[in-house]
């Protein structure tokens, strides 16, 4: 029973990682870059929700929607002004820029919102679920997180695989030149990908801060790194891979905390990544490099 | 029969490499024109420049009277100029049908019309029909070439650019592909065909240009070039 409860918590944390990892993996798939500022978009989104609810008294759902819209715009602005001018530049230059954007967002947050941690009040109001005569208690946050993540993942899969725009994204991620020959606007598709990833980051921020309620300018950094790990773990560029990697990572983290050591949990998570990459360099569901005839 | 595509004094560079040196040529409406040349002559560079994937340093490209030299690739196809790129470049993780549907990405005439044309493509290329749900990456080279052609036709182009469609295919398949190109032309699509297989290309073409290290060395009616001694030595091996 105890194990089951840890497992459910792991799935819950993991599905938040999965949502963040989707942002990393989609951007990587389309723009072939690691957007290290992605984690900080989570932080910005969480602050916006916090301010909306605690300081302006806006209803939580409205605050979340405003935060999603703002993060979408933030993602588009970051892409437009920081990354787009570097298209075709060396990947090292892009990587350093992404790290720069990450620090910029953290320091702007420090400037506007200060360094003292804010205590985020959970947006979840549904009561915990008691199962097996109260031996197994699933918190409202956990239920909301798992349900929201599942809906997002299914929705995203349907969007990418079943819609014209989604298929265009897959085409751009495979071959930009050929996609342009189909009449697909590559710049627009890249911007759209950043927009979707950033909107998801806003949702992830709310879910994360509802479960772990301390909010400060560096809040996005660790989940960001872990979700990036999850994306690599599942196979960077692969959407199902990001989902699987995220969920597995969450489970590994929570079980390590429960049964091995709280301090070592993060080390274990990264060690698992290294082992997986040694055995399968493309990650769990990574596509093998297409051989061109 | 006006000029459909016109290329004037085109110069294209890769960094300091001068790949296309001041070439000019044109394609008239309804024609099959072939551009033949050896490896590295600059055929693909020319095709990419026409389609907008590469930008020339100087020179002009115009299509149906529109200057397209500075136009973005995704807008050029909307004018009715479609390309079957070298090496096919099908989207290997998408199915045959998804590839074809992406070919119709620019169309605004509704999904019923697209579905209708999809069936017409399947009639023309029955091998694709049997494999419509199969991932394009699992198709054979010949099937991929057919898919690339079908995909390029789905936008209902006025003109089709084909970059070495015979590359890596058996003689029988090459015949089949060339037959398709002729049929498409019969239906009113103007063709610019890039080939190393000069013999086959000259057989179906009206006119030809010979490209050598970035310059046009010879031009004329295809049957004349096919009988030219130099061409016979250099490209036809006899
Ligand atoms: N991306 C590139 N960077 C630098 N040089 C290039 C690039 N692409 C092509 N070139 C050079 O430009 C010249 C023309 O190449 P192009 O690909 O147009 O030739 P091609 O006639 O299509 O040859 P093939 O028959 O082998 O396809 C070659 O000398 C080639 O090395
Ligand atoms: Mg070529």
Image (spheres, coloured by chain):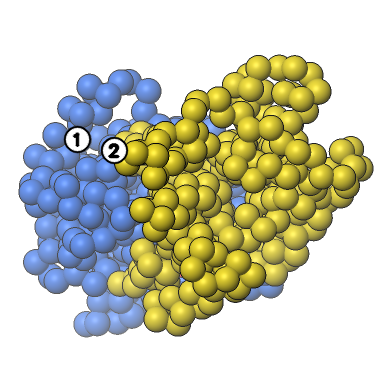
Chain colours: A yellow, B blue
Check if mark 1's residue and mark 2's residue have beta carbons within 8 Å: yes
Mark 2 — on which chain does it sit?
B
SS at circle 1? helix
Residue A253's place in the image compared with B188, above or below, is below
For residue B101, the mark is 2
Residue furthest toward the front?
Answer: A133
Q: Name the spot of residue A188 as percent of width and height, x first.
A: 57, 38
Pick the residue in front: A31 or B86: A31
Q: Name the spot of residue B190 as percent of width and height, x first.
A: 31, 41
Q: On the picture, is B170 further left or further right than A171?
A: left
Residue at 33%, 80% in the rendered image: B234
The yes-or-no answer for disc 1 within 8 Å of ligand 2 is: no
Residue at 76%, 25% in the rendered image: A54
Q: Name the spot of residue A236 as percent of width and height, x first.
A: 48, 62
Classed neighbour count for the residue bearing mark 2: other residues with Cα under 10 Å, few (<14), some (14–19), many (≥20): many
SS at circle 2? helix
Q: Quadrant of residue B121?
A: top left
Residue A259's place in the image compared with A131, above or below, is below
Residue at 24%, 49% in the rendered image: B95
Disc 1 and disc 2 on one polypeptide chain? yes
Instruction: Say whether disc 1 or disc 2 marks the residue closer to the N-terminus.
Output: 2
């Amino acid at each position: 029973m105890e194990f089951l409860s840890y497992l459910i918590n792991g799935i819950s944390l993991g599905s938040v990682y999965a949502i963040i990892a989707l942002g990393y993996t989609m951007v990587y798939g389309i723009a072939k870059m690691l957007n290290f500022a992605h984690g900080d978009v989570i932080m910005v989104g969480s602050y916006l929700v916090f301010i909306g609810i605690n300081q302006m008294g806006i209803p939580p759902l409205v605050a979340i929607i405003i935060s999603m819209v703002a993060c979408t715009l933030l993602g588009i602005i970051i892409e437009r002004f920081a990354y787009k001018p570097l298209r075709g530049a060396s990947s090292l230059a892009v990587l350093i820029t992404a790290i720069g954007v990450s620090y910029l967002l953290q320091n702007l947050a420090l400037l506007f919102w200060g360094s003292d941690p804010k205590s985020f009040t959970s947006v979840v109001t549904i009561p915990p679920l008691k199962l097996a005569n109260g031996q197994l208690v699933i918190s409202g946050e956990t239920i909301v997180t798992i349900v929201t993540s599942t809906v997002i993942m299914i929705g995203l899969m349907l969007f990418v695989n079943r819609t014209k725009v989604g298929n265009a994204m897959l085409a751009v991620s495979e071959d930009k030149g050929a996609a342009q020959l189909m009449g697909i606007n590559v710049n627009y598709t890249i911007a759209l990908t950043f927009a979707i990833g950033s909107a998801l980051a806003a949702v992830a921020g709310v879910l994360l801060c509802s479960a772990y309620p301390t909010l400060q300018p560096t809040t996005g950094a660790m989940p960001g790194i872990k979700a990036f790990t999850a994306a690599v773990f599942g196979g960077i560029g692969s959407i199902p891979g990001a989902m699987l990697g995220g969920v597995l990572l969450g489970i590994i983290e929570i079980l390590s905390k429960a049964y091995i050591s709280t301090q070592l949990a993060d080390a274990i998570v990264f060690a698992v990544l290294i082992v997986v990459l040694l055995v399968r360099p493309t990650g769990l569901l990574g596509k093998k490099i297409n051989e061109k005839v | 029969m006006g000029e459909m595509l016109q290329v004037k004094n085109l110069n294209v560079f890769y960094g300091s490499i001068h790949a296309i040196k001041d070439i000019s040529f044109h394609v008239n409406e309804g024609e099959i024109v072939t551009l033949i040349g050896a490896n590295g002559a600059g055929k693909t560079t020319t095709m990419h420049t026409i389609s907008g994937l590469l930008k020339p340093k100087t020179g002009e490209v115009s299509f149906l009277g529109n200057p397209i030299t500075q136009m973005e690739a995704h807008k050029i196809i909307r004018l009715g100029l479609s390309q079957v790129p070298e090496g096919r470049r099908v989207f290997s993780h998408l199915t045959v049908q998804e590839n074809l549907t992406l070919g119709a990405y620019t169309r605004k005439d509704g999904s019923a019309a697209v579905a209708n044309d999809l069936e017409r493509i399947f009639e023309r290329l029955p091998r694709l029909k049997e494999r419509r749900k199969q991932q394009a990456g699992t198709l054979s080279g010949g099937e991929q070439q057919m898919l690339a052609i079908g995909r390029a036709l789905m936008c209902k182009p006025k003109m089709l650019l084909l970059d070495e469609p015979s590359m890596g295919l058996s003689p029988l398949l090459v015949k089949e592909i060339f037959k398709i190109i002729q049929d498409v032309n019969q239906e009113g699509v103007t063709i610019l065909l890039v080939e190393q297989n000069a013999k086959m290309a000259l057989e179906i073409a009206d006119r030809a240009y010979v490209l050598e290290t970035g310059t046009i060395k010879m031009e004329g009616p295809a049957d004349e070039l096919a009988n030219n001694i130099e061409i016979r030595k250099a490209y036809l091996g006899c």
